[in-house]
């Protein structure tokens, strides 16, 4: 019967060049691939394909490619432990959706069968990969890996890559993959969260080892939407590649010419919209050409400047920084971009300034203050010509910049251009601005659900035994649980699996019998407001905590907000912490405001679980305001980021108007300090009061950290202990009587 | 219809004192409990009850208890997230089996509803708990917790407790639970694996905080079968308890009078069968009576002696060691027991020797060598009278021991007694020796499946792509995979879920593309023999390894045996390790023999992941023999056990006839040594050769560690660095020319 059906199918498809085979099972698929001849089409039946590992190994011809496609676009789902290998010639894969699973191998879609059998003249088109991630945050997985030559990836849609590993990469690790002339176009690279580690690139071409090979890949008309994985949105690591007409929308990173020469970066659009850490183009190596690009609203500095030209290492090894030479940045437009960084990264190792490099005909347009240029070394090797600025300020050279009052308007694409431009400065991008709509596929959504707090329903939760965990179990993402006052007793863990607010305006006190009260599992985020958490009934064992993350890897970043809360009697046994996180978890934001922590035998915020010293850390932004830490045996805060990696921001901390009294003196306090910061790159501690506390300890490691402590009073508290470069302080008082108000005129410590 | 059925059921049960209600759902159960009157029986229908949390809160009477029972014994299974609370009076729970799940609370069966509503005169009988463990090894969970008074737990069967937390415990944390007179009898306490941490007690009565309260619990006729959780099989922590007629079969620990006075330990049988670390009775505190107990074949020393009388702390706080006083150990029999320990634990803190204590009428029978007594302090406070020894040796006092040649025979229970005993020494246990058969239930097996290597089938595995992982996925526990030679390429993880041997007698080389080749998951154990593992194709990222444990908690101990293997080219990136374990995993044994490790950028055995300093560690026994470590940038071995806990053995290490050449010099070697041992209690390193290696580092912390290094040659290698007490060394040579043979007459280093 089935054979008859096939026969019928073949008969009605005589108009096709080849045979069209509809397959419904893995074995039918395998058989169809084995039988495939030039011109054939293999059609995956609509539905869900679980645990399907496809080896599409076949030989088509230029005129008669072999096609592997979905029966209907967007109706074929590859799920669970699945992957795809493409090997041979003139093969086309089209219309599949990868979701609800992850690859059993480290490459999801690989343009090779094995090291010897690669893909040539093959095409991946209209394929969607949506959150196809393994559970392990730091187990590297790549979604698409190109080997061979003349392959094309187009109109694909890559959304929500969560764990380590590049989204799409071109390899040059054998002679067969060099001068490959791949084309990567019209793809939608969707949201990629901050990985908090190296390995979060969205697109990489080459590796340092093969970076002196020619790749000749063209990357054009792609849309990069909030690709925030790490500093390098794109990491160019080979010669002779072209990046043109791509749009980078609110991406926290840059198009980085990390290795390799003769790159052409032309006609791209970078839109930051003032979002933090958004960057543009970073130049390293030789003979790079950066022309006609448009950058607006980019806020990043250092390695994330709107334009960054780096210092290099003399006789650099392949994996370090080849000095910039014979390069050009011309006819680019920078509108309201915060930083242009020249000779960036200058240090003892990166001592070679750029040479024979030209910066000309660029437009630096600012609505208000002057364009800011960071000069970190000798810029005499950069020739500045005919650049235009519209606000008066300090320029790198007198002669290379013209101050002109200009008039600007927005064009049909929303980009700013000068209405009168006799010097012909800046970018012209008519018809070359890539929009979201022309990328990816039309039949699959580009947006993901919102994860904001407070967008769901409000549910009242009465006091009682396990009423809270019951309510949490029934809640939906974004809901608000309103505790109506009284004693809430938990004998069960309260497991937070999605975004949830737990609030109270009445007196609501939570006690619990386990070692932990709240666990934030993967996908969860928690806001606590107006609650009292009392540890007195908790398990009599060491290492309790009030809140913990999953003990397992979390591949989704979480947020924790604590406001108007009280934590007390965390002292049934030693080392009782408020927040204890696990390795391989990452908080976008931890915010503590107007809260009290009292009688704690452990630490309050323990964000120091990444001890492998490879640049990974536990939290991006930590904000602590107007809060009291009293009788805390461990530290109020311990943050750790080891290693010398420079591909992340390495953490932000702000402490303002806090009070630390008798903090850090416990014999089991491993960091022997009230606040311990190791390798955290950006910190400000201010307007705070320390009484009978252990000292603040700060260790600064790599790059250009900025660590500032000011307007604090240290009463019977040791001096701040600092190791490394990048620290500054002022207005440090050492007795209660000498303290004056803070930098905002308000008293030090908490403000009622 | 259902109501009619009930009615019918009630009618045909008029002969019962009360009503018998068969319930089939959680809500029917709840309703039946609510309706229950004295004399009623609530009958759980045969089958599996998933996610069932039973609150059995009711009021029976002495003559008319309320019964909650299985429809048929052994046919009612409580599974998944389930638990049981008993609250009220005269309630009986009978015939349930808890398996395939774990409690959502930290107490599985709790004799209370909440802190105010406890259980009185209630009984738990013929209930089975089999491997009802949460996945987190170190999240404390207790199986049965007694509150209230006059409760009984009898004929229950507790098998395979895997994670932290006592199996059965009596709490005295409120006045209602003091002088409770509970009875714990005829239970079968089955296999409990070595936890590798404090918190592995099988039975505990009281806590240090309430240890001066009277409990008056009787524990009798129970069978403890291989309860190896930690040093304390039973931890007595309150006054006036009785332990009598229990059998302890091959248990690695002791019946410990840890706190509390006036304990009676009478008529118990301890059978060690020569198994390592088996112990007997340990006396601490005052007015303890140890009479008529029988101990045979116990090998333990220190805190695990057959009889241990400890030193105490003057004016001891509740949670330390109250000095022994007014205690008696009389008429006990010790047959072929290795150690009797007197004044054990004597140190600066435990400086008070026992006082007014009598040791009399005991029989110390040895087949061959003399009974060994450990004397650690002044024993003048112990009065020895009329004890009998049958082998000549050094006794604690001259007068208290009589050397007599005796004749002994075995009685019906297999226990040895003297055929002629005019002085009336030793134990008499006629009719009081508890056998397995009279404990627990008859309708549920007491044994678990064997986990031995090599008991399954042999399967040949051909070379090729992922042939190994395919064969592993199809294998059964105990199978042997025989690699038939050639190149085995893995693009997939090889996941070890059960006991498996992978061997080859031909040349079989395994390469892999991931960051890890083998992962030992929970329940897995791995034996590798005759294989070459080559890291050259593995992922180009730091922290690769050849073998790793689960990244998650493992609640089952694992074993790893490596024999005749070669590991090479582990250098694609930095910090490439051979074995990398995760926290919350525990190896019973790791054994490496006749193997070669060459070109490794990380460490070979990294067993140092438990950094919380609470006495947890990663491996019990590590044996390394006749193996070569060459060009290893990290350490050959790093083992760590922090904290000052004394409830475990804290690890065993033996290194014999090994060769370390150019080991430990990597800049990223965190321990800066070739072998790093921190807090490991029992180590011997001998007959080995170190050339151009970083030094051995040893840190000794707590208790009475024994760390011996002898017959080794350190060529161009730093001196051994030791911190702490308990180290000894001899025959350490410092140049190749001065090296002589080892303690076995063979050359140092590997022996062909």
Image (spheres, coloured by chain):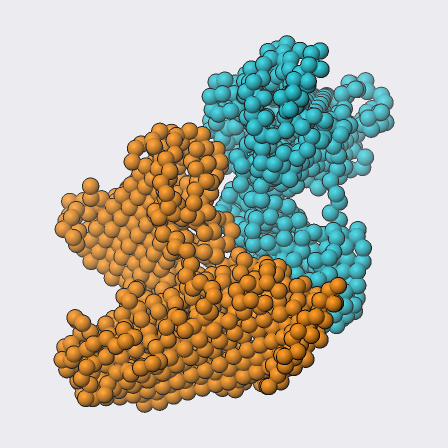
Chain colours: A cyan, B orange
Q: Nearer the viewer, residue A138 or A746?
A: A138
Is B269 placed above or below A722 here?
below
Disc count in the image? 0
For the point 56% across and 18% down, the residue is A35
Q: Which of B368 and B19 is in front in this view?
A: B19
For the point 84% across and 27% down, the residue is A410
Question: Is A685 on the left or on the right of A294, as rendered?
Answer: left
Q: Where is residue B566 in the image (x, y as percent from the top left)?
A: 32, 38
Residue A67, quarter of the rendered image? top right
Q: Where is residue B579 in the image (x, y as percent from the top left)?
A: 40, 46
Q: Which of A705 and A123 is in front in this view?
A: A123
For the point 22% across and 45% down, the residue is B749
Residue A254, quarter of the rendered image? top right
Q: Nearer the viewer, residue A666 or A14?
A: A14
Question: Does the rendering let one see residue B411?
Answer: yes
Is B692 placed above or below B64 here?
above
Is B283 placed above or below B356 here?
above
Q: Give the quadrant of the N terminus of chain B.
A: bottom right
Q: Give the quadrant of the C terminus of chain B.
A: top left
For the point 48% across and 57% down, the residue is B555
Is B584 placed above or below A57 here?
below
Question: Does the rendering let one see residue A149?
Answer: no
Question: Is B431 on the left or on the right of B524, as rendered?
Answer: left
Q: Position of residue A546 (x, y in %)?
A: 62, 63
Q: Position of residue A225 (x, y in %)?
A: 71, 34
């Amino acid at each position: 019967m089935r054979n008859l059906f096939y026969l019928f199918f073949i008969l009605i498809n005589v108009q096709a060049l080849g045979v069209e085979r509809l397959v419904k099972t893995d074995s039918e698929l395998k058989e169809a691939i084995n039988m495939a001849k030039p011109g054939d089409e293999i059609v995956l039946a609509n539905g869900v394909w679980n645990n399907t590992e496809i080896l599409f190994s076949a030989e088509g011809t230029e005129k008669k490619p072999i096609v592997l496609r979905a029966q209907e676009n967007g109706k074929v789902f590859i799920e669970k432990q699945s992957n795809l290998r493409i090997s041979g010639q003139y093969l086309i894969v089209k219309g599949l959706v990868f979701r609800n699973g992850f690859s059993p191998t480290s490459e999801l879609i690989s343009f090779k069968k094995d090291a010897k059998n690669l893909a040539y003249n093959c095409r991946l088109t209209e394929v969607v990969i949506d959150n196809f991630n393994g559970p392990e945050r730091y187990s590297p997985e790549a979604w698409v890996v190109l080997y061979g030559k003349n392959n094309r990836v187009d109109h694909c849609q890559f959304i929500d890559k969560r764990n380590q590993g590049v989204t799409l990469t071109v390899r040059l690790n054998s002679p067969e993959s060099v001068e490959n002339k791949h084309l990567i176009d019209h793809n939608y690279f969707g949201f990629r969260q901050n990985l908090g580690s190296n390995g979060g690139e969205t697109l990489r071409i080459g590796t340092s080892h093969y970076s002196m090979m020619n790749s000749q890949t063209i990357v054009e008309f792609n849309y990069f939407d909030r690709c925030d994985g790490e500093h390098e949105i794109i990491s160019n690591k080979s010669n002779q590649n072209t990046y043109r007409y791509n749009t980078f929308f609110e991406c926290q990173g840059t198009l980085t010419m990390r290795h390799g020469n003769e790159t052409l970066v032309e006609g791209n659009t970078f839109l930051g919209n003032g979002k933090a850490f958004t960057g543009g183009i970073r130049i390293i190596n030789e003979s790079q050409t950066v022309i006609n690009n448009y950058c607006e609203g980019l806020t990043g500095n250092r390695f994330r400047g709107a334009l960054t030209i780096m210092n290099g290492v003399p006789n650099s090894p392949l994996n370090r920084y080849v000095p910039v030479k014979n390069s050009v940045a011309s006819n680019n437009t920078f509108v309201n971009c915060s930083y242009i960084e020249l000779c960036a990264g200058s240090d003892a190792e990166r001592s070679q300034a750029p040479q024979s490099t030209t910066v000309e005909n660029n437009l630096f347009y600012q609505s208000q203050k002057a364009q800011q240029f960071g000069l970190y070394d000798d810029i005499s090797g950069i020739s500045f010509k005919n650049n235009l600025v519209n606000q008066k300020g300090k320029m790198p050279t007198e002669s290379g910049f013209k101050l002109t009052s200009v008039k600007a308007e927005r064009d049909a694409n929303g980009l700013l251009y000068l209405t009168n431009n006799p010097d012909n400065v800046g970018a012209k991008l008519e018809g070359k601005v890539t929009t979201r709509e022309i990328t990816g596929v039309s039949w699959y959504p580009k947006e993901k659900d919102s994860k904001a707090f407070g967008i769901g329903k409000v549910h009242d939760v009465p006091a009682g035994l396990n009423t809270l965990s019951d309510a949490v179990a029934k809640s939906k993402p974004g809901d608000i649980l309103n505790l109506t006052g009284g004693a809430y007793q938990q004998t069960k863990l309260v497991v937070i699996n999605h975004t949830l607010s737990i609030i109270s305006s009445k007196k609501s006190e939570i006690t619990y019998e386990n070692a932990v009260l709240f666990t934030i599992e993967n996908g969860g985020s928690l806001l606590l407001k107006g609650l009292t958490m009392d540890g007195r009934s908790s398990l009599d064992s060491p290492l309790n905590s009030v809140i913990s993350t999953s003990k397992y890897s979390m591949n989704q970043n979480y947020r924790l907000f604590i406001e108007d809360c009280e934590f007390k009697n965390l002292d049934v046994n030693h080392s009782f912490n408020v927040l204890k996180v696990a390795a391989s978890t990452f908080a976008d934001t931890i915010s503590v405001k107007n809260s009290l922590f009292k009688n704690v035998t452990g630490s309050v915020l323990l964000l120091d679980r990444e001890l492998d010293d490879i640049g990974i850390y536990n939290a991006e932004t930590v904000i602590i305001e107007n809060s009291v830490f009293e009788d805390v045996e461990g530290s109020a805060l311990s943050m750790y980021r080891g290693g010398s990696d420079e591909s992340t921001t390495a953490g932000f901390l702000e402490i303002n108007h806090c009070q630390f009294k008798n903090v850090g003196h416990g014999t089991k306090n491993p960091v022997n300090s009230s606040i311990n910061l190791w390798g955290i790159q950006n910190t400000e501690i201010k307007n705070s009061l320390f009484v009978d506390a252990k000292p603040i300890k700060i260790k600064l490691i790599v790059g250009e950290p900025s660590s500032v402590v000011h307007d604090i009073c240290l009463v019977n508290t040791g001096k701040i202990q600092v190791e490394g470069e990048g620290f500054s302080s002022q207005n440090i008082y050492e007795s209660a009587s000498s303290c004056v108000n803070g930098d905002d005129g308000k008293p030090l410590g908490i403000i009622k």
